[in-house]
Image (tube, rainbow, N blue to C red):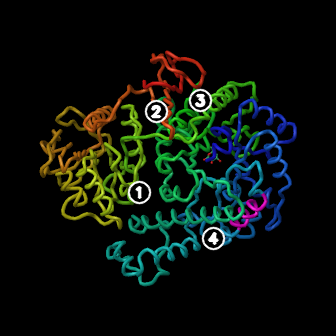
Amino acid sequence: MIADRLGGLAFGGDYNPEQWDEPVWKEDDELMREARVNLATVGVFSWALLEPEEGRYDFAWLDAHLDRLHANGIAVDLATPTASPPPWFTLAHPDAMPVTRDGTRLVHGSRDTYCLSAPAYRTAARRIASALAERYGDHPAVAMWHVHNEYVTLCWCEHTAAAFRVWLRARHGSLDALNEAWGTAFWSQRYGSWEQVLPPRATQWHRNPGLTLDFSRFFSDEVVAAYSEQRDAIRAHSDRPVTTNMMQPGYQNVDLWALSREVDLVAIDHYPDRPGLDAAADVAFAADRARSFGGGRPWLLMEQGTSTVYEQGRTLAKEPGEILRHSLGHIARGSDGALFFQWRQSKAGAEQWHSAMVPHAGPDSRVFTEVKATGEAVSRLGDLAGSTVTADVAVLHDSDAWWALNSDGLPSSELGYHSALRNAHRALWDNGVVTDFAHPEADLSRYRLVVAPALYLLSDAGAENLRRYVVDGGTLLVQYFSGVVDSRGHARLGGYPAAPLREVLGIRVEEYRPLRHEERIVLSDSSHGTVWSESVRAQGAEVIAAYTHGALAGSPALTRNHCGTGDAWYLSTQLDDADYTALMSRLLDAAGVGPVRPPGIEVVVRQGEDGRCWQFVLNHLAEPVPLPEAHDVLTGGPVRELPPGGCAVLTGGPL
Ligand code: GAL
């Protein structure tokens, strides 16, 4: 466990000392001590310095920084620099530069510019990872390894095409099977040889959905393989944990269930894209995902910003108190620390305007003052390292469903997987419950309520798993346009959703009727729907709310079916936020999940193996919140009230 190596929770961030000089390094040493930094991520973008020419290494500068950090009591999360190959690499291996969908070959001058399937890139990446591990594998400063940085770069070049074909042969076995899976009988797409198969490059109209789904799966496997190669190269020389930082929840280039199986601990980066309460909800969303991907084990917030929230092309300042509150929001939900990008704000270069722990203004600043307060708070929470969080509710999360829902030609362009997940999580968060994410084929028996939003693609095994979950006593909410296609993306025939699920729900969906842009309909229980509607026939299910207008007037919109010892609900439209939150409240009640807290006050419990509990209370509201008297670990004293925006970590007695 990383906390064992650090003697507590991790606090710190990306440290790029190569941007600075001796006097600044001296100040860094002092300020890091002041801020109680104990972990620095070093070397993420250092390839050009570490290997100035192909095969010639210069480690002297890194030796000096690792020794300095170690002498200062700061451990290192040592990165492999493979997210940003140096210019010499491009010139030596132009074929390893990525090609966009429309055929443009990119060049260096930014970062993340490589083709993951190019043999020269993979060889160079393994080589530098291996050289670093050989030199620093048992360096006393090195506490963990950080492979690469956010695997994001897609490519459509000839190397990719070749690797894709190898992958397709392994998946489908024969061209006939591929032709059948992709439905190439339509639009004269039948492939007569493997060489005819191309990645989904720019083309005239809708791309074949089987091709795009398989390409997403292929790319994800390529990432997992590239990561695993570097991890194995490191493990040959080092016994320290190895991970990679997973990108923002909105990116879905990689199946994070699969990648998480390969890392020693899940690590994520998180930058909210909306301010205020939405940002707090987004912290919870990202943190609950990270915990779930790691199977409930503690994980690590590898990057966040000190003063920026991305919103539609602007970087908004975090409000006073949010640096601490967001950090605690992640820790409450299982992170064994809070790290930032980056320690010191760059004076030049591509991210000179990105926030940092030490801003351009220097240590005499609001940001650094809040960073110090956060470091102090995190340092008091060392005892809870390794403790875990339990949830009674799960939202289903499946990469195949996500990718399939990105297909061209769906009945509405307003169907988004990420937004559907986020809305479901938000409606539960607004009800004050902690939510896990789970794969549709995972064991769901420990959850009282399972929510399946936008589960467009559902495998036969997944449908059977959901049937069993309900029959065995679970409460399930399936939402519109779910269980519609099988693992190959083929439509389920005879009525949606997939057969065993249809029976459990006691309904049959006969027709999809997307709503017009911004159309809002009213249901018989006065709730409102947008985006989507369906012609649903109740076949045993009780109708809880019906459509009231148009062709669907009188037909079911929301149903409930008792099946075995559980209940299966079906929602065939997208409810307004308030109505959706109210539905979740009703379902939580029916499933016996509580306690439910008012929105804006977040309460999460971490529990140790020895039964010790820490209750995080985060007040996101502008009013004070009274608390029953308890001991607050953050202040080391009793607490009776949380001020607006205040936080406490309570021990002793439930709230
Ligand atoms: C992350 C990335 C960092 C930095 C940061 C800025 O996605 O890993 O290197 O660019 O974004 O927000």
Q: Are marks 2 and 4 in contact (CB under 8 Å)?
A: no
Residue at label 2? Answer: 604
Q: Are marks 3 and 2 in contact (CB under 8 Å)?
A: no
Q: Secondary structure at mark 3?
A: helix
Q: Please provide percent x and percent y for residue 183.
A: 33, 73
Q: Earlier in the sequence, mark 2 or mark 1?
A: 1
Q: Which residue lies most toward the front here?
A: 610
Q: Which amino acid, by three-letter code, is at mark 2? A: Val
> How many other residues sit within 10 Å of disc 2, few (<14), some (14-19) or many (≥20)?
many
* Mark whose residue sits in front, 1 or 4: 4
Residue at label 4? Answer: 118
Q: Are marks 2 and 1 in contact (CB under 8 Å)?
A: no
Q: In the image, is 39 to the left or to the right of 493?
A: right
* Mark whose residue sits in front, 3 or 4: 3
Q: In the image, is 459 to the left or to the right of 258?
A: left
Residue at label 1? Answer: 406
Instruction: Say the numbered circle drawn on residue 561.
Output: none
Measured in 3D between alpha carbons, the distance from the residue under mark 1 to the one under mark 4, in whole angstroms, is 26 Å
Q: In the image, is 185 to the left or to the right of 110?
A: left
> How many other residues sit within 10 Å of disc 4, few (<14), some (14-19) or many (≥20)?
many
Q: Which amino acid, by three-letter code, is at mark 4? A: Ala
Q: Secondary structure at mark 1?
A: loop
Q: Secondary structure at mark 4?
A: loop
Residue at label 3? Answer: 324
Which region shows up in magenta? 124-135
Measured in 3D between alpha carbons, the distance from the residue under mark 3 to the one under mark 4, in whole angstroms, is 42 Å
